[in-house]
Image (tube, rainbow, N blue to C red):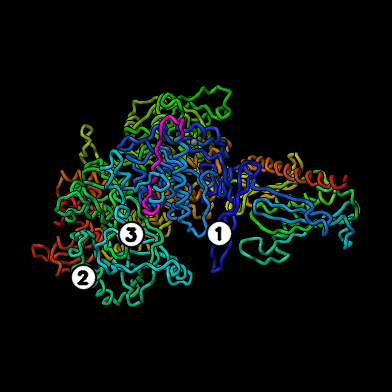
Amino acid sequence: MELYSPEGLRIDGRRWNELRRFECKINTHPHSADGSSYVEQGNTKIICMVRGPMEPAMKSQVNATSSTVEVNVSLANFSTFERKKRSKTDKRITELKTTLERTFNECIMGHLYPRTLISVTVQVLAQDGGLLAAMTNAVTLALIDAGIAMYDYVSGVNAGLYDQTSALLDLNTLEENDMCSLTIGVIGKSEKLALVVLEDKLPLDRLESVLAIAIAGSHRIRELMDMEVRKHGNMRLAKVSV
Amino acid sequence: MITNRKRLSSGLSVTSKVFVRSRNGNALKIVREHYLRNDIPCYSHACHKCQEIVKPDAQGQLPKFILSSSPTKTKDGVSHYVVIDTNIILHAIDLLENTQCFYDVIVPQTVLEEVRNRSFPIYQRLRNLVKSEDKRFVVFHNEYNEATYVNREKGQSINDRNDHAIRKVASWFNSHLNTENSPTPIHIIFICNDVDNCTKAKQEGIDARSLVDYIDSLPNGEDLRDLIPSDIVLPGNFEGDQNETVFPEYYSNARIMAGIKNGTLYQGMLNISSYNYLQGTVSVPAFKKPLLIIGSKNLNRAFNSDSVIVELLPKDKWKEPSSTIIEEGSIGADDNAGDDEDDLGEETGGVVSDKERVFLAQEAMKATSSKTNESRLQPTAKIVGVVRRSWRYYVGQIAPSSVSEETGHSSRSCFVILMDKLLPKVRIRTRKAKEYLGQRIVIVVDSWPSNSRYPNGHFVRTLGEIESAEAETEALLLEHDVEYRPFSKNVLDCLPKEGDNWVVPDMTDPQDPQLKKRVDLRDRLVCSIDPPGCVDIDDALHARVLPNGNYEVGVHIADVTHFVKPNTALDQEGASRGTSVYLVDKRIDMLPMLLGTNLCSLKPFVDRFAFSVIWELDENANILKVDYMKSVIKSRQAFSYEQAQLRIDDPTQTDELTNSMRVLLKLSKKLKQGRMDAGALNLASPEVKVHMDSETSDPQEVEIKKLLETNSLVEEFMLFANISVARKIYDSYPQTAMLRRHAPPPATNFETLNDMLNVRKNGMSISLESSKALADSLDRIVDPNDPYFNTLIRIMSTRCMMAAEYFPSGSYGYPEFRHYGLAVDIYTHFTSPIRRYCDVVVHRQLAGAIGYENLDLSHRDKQRMEMIVKNINKRHRNAQFAGRSSIEYYVGQVMRNNEAEHEGYVIKCFNNGIVVLVPKFGVEGLIKLETMGDLATANYNEDKYELTFTDLKGAQRTVAMFDKVTVDVKSVKDEVSGKRRAQLMLR
Ligand SMILES: [Zn+2]
């Protein structure tokens, strides 16, 4: 099948600048965590749970001026079409973990919670491209649900360059396998990036066009997440006021 | 299987496609998202609704509406669009490309995907049809369209579901275009050769027709009927053949995969020997020597240059390569193509015909007798599978003996003998066999079932009378895969709108920042020197003495890339053509005429954009400084080589321009000396030129090309510029610089030639230590009695050399960049961008290197460069072959009127014939033993390269390698292949 046909349609029927189906929920596991969320970005499905701020179990995790974010990532064996066992020390998992930790340490107002640990667990149920972006969105929502102070939303999406000419938004697995792609996390409605990960190489003079659609896509995702947060907030408010 | 649809806020709806795939024996459930939309237009000019729903693509382009609002009509005057089914495309792509039918065609996406899965080359041809817009083909993405998407019913096969989807496209277009308020009704005809699908379509109210019915309904249907492929007219046609299998069946895919994995089967490309069409070789990486494939049963239906799977034969069947000549003409030419069983295979017990068996027996004898020379024994193999067919258009002629005498209107089988001697004859069905006799025709091969002795094909079109210049020229272009059709509309659209009136813009215009980067060199005394009558002037030169006594020398090359911007249709067309092709009486341009002969051509007396290389050279032509710049120049004069030579030689001419040419000549001699000292080779090839009568354009006489000093002047500076540019772009783009290399010849290439020289010419030999040693040793090989002998050896050495090739710098290490023939460490082609695509790429890279403009990504990406290089290497080779064949054809025509005896040299010896080269015409021809003497008395001494026989007058005679012989040169038409060639007879 053609990845991006001359008629301008992608392998799953979208156009270049269209997001996949994005659905999210917060407060999905109110009893087992302080904050939780569920995100579906296309067929990539993620559950995230946040505990804390709490006292760190280990002395080494104590930071006198700020909180410490710890992220644990687990990929379900059935998350890809071919079932595969992965060890915890899988290089890719470690990379995802450190990327997320670094990103959210910056975006949480850590100085409000000195000497505490914020523990984030990300469970990947299904993978179909844009894994890091979907994780970022899930963590953001779970942190908000946990009531942890953040500077703003961090909304993530990936984008790629097809045939060195056409920038495509929100790649699925098939597309990701065949082109170089970029994942970004945008802070709020700004154009500030909390996260940029580039796999493979991207020609410098095309970077701008890819970044531009990725930022626009992230803003759209932020709106969708914001709608869910507000909807949930209103629902809770209604319960409280009754 | 499809689950429920869900509407998204963005106006799309999403469903998921679930399918099960088996991998390594496990079932795998795969779920993919599938988005449906309502903004896919119908692409018809007759529709006004769709103009409003279109959306731009990633480049901001809106879709073009292609389908005409007044499409072609059938015999009955019905304006119609056509929706085609997959099997029609797979079997009749030639017909779709034909300019006499099939306009306004809708290709459903479902069909496109099926075609792509079945045959990638046909998919590409289909995509090209869509892209060129000439024939108004559109791809309609029905699978993504909410209105045309169909679910797969429970228990429905994928094929049935896809058929349904395709029918849905036809009915959708029908109702979409023909509403009450549409001005002209446009009928939708669905063409499909599947009876079941046709019936269903008719039930759904669609006008479904088979290909034959559709063609019959066209006004020119009668002419087109023969173009319908054989297997569509009569599925399972050509029944008639023997019922038993003639050829072994190919192995199953699974068996081939397993065999390759465990190392018992090998994959490689089949090369049929040019002297024996029943013998081929397959080179596989696993063996040092190529594997021999002998006999048609082992060749098992493979064509020359097919990609095949081979299996080794047991060791007792290994043998030496044959030193016998076999041409297809001599075997089986009189077979009947008929469908009648009686006529076929009477005495053939299987595939081996009697004559074939004789040859095989002779071969077998030899393999067993010459045990002494074990090392020449080569492993043999048989072909058990064909991975990729090299089938393309073939040119040939109908074998007269295969045309049945009966008259009648039904179509009959006949044989087509292809021009390419390495290929078997092909059986086609036509009603007009008699009409096509004596004409060059184009055919396509459709299939070669294992129960058929010959491949089946169908007629495409006729080129005209055999031996008419037009037919022969077109034939050789087709045979060498040269694209010669006029440039399509979307290519021509890329040219400047001003056309011939385009002029260099005002250089003082401050608006254009690029113009500011150009250097104004209009004050330099630039001139061009080319062959007489040259219209596409790529290059021009200037020289002047600097105040410090040094010289400023400039080479100015047409600035083609100013007009040919990357990724335009024009660029893609140039890239795919790769090179212009020069035939004796015709030139096939790489770029449209307007550029080649006007806007880019460095014509005299007008301003032109150029890309200049300017050196400061000292008295000994050493480089003190080199600069590269985009410039604007004004040539003072366009000389021919002779004019320039006369002017330089005339002492009364003392003007500045002439003096500057003298400077150039002086420096060029220094440059040449320097190259020769470094060991550059001077290899002769029998280059001949055909003089044409300008009135009748009939060829008049043949002349070996003469070289003047001014030829070498231009050549030296072009080499010089190429080398300087190569260094510059390699410096800037170490991984992707477009370069050209020439590998040193492996010693084995010269083994035979050296052995022959040693045996026949008292220990003379060619040294291979270095190019310098080779050049020197070639100089020493002289026969005091025969000045031509040295040239002969040079010609033969050229054939032992490797071919030079283009490559991106990343694919070799620096030491391997070397150009052996020119004896330089790095080289490229920069000086002819009008006629070579390599130079276009190099121009862009150089422009990037000097910061004139950003280099396009495709020339910075290693994989893309590999693809470009692969194509231009192939095009370059084809162009050379085409040029040579063209000369051959005209030389044949000249010889027709000049039959005489000439001197020739024996350049190959076989046990049943010799090959003689006639320097006067640059032709070589085979002389078979039976035309020289008695077969029975012949004795071939392989060690001494001598053939001894009793000649026709009864005298004992010996001919040997390198012998100078007198031959009667006659031009004869081969009645079987229709090719005219030199027939030589030994005196
Ligand atoms: Zn429409």
Q: Please provide percent x and percent y for residue B118.
A: 43, 55
| Disc nearest the viewer among 3 and 2 | 3
Mark 3, residues whose alpha carbon is within 10 Å: few (<14), some, or many (≥20)? many
Asked whether residue B966 is in view, the answer is no
| Callout 1 and callout 2 share a chain | yes
Residue type for callout 2 = Val
Q: Is B688 colored magenta in this rendering?
A: no
Q: Which residue is mark 2?
A: B358
Q: Which residue is mark 3?
A: B303
Q: Quadrant of the C terminus of chain B?
A: bottom left
Query: Left or right: where does residue B737 sit relative to residue B284?
Result: right
Front label number (1 vs 3): 1
Residue topped by disc 1: B19
Q: Is mark 3 within 8 Å of ligand 1?
A: no
Occupied quadrant, residue A95: bottom right
Mark 2, ligand 1, within 8 Å: the answer is no
- Residue shown at the point (52%, 58%) measured from the top left: B154
Q: Chain of mark 1?
A: B
- Badge 2: chain ID: B
Q: CA distance from mark 1 to mark 3?
A: 38 Å
Which one is in front in this view, the residue at disc 1 or the one at disc 2? Answer: 1
Q: Secondary structure at mark 3?
A: loop
Q: Nearer the viewer, residue B148 or B129?
A: B148
Residue B186 drawn in magenta? yes
Element assignment for label 1: strand
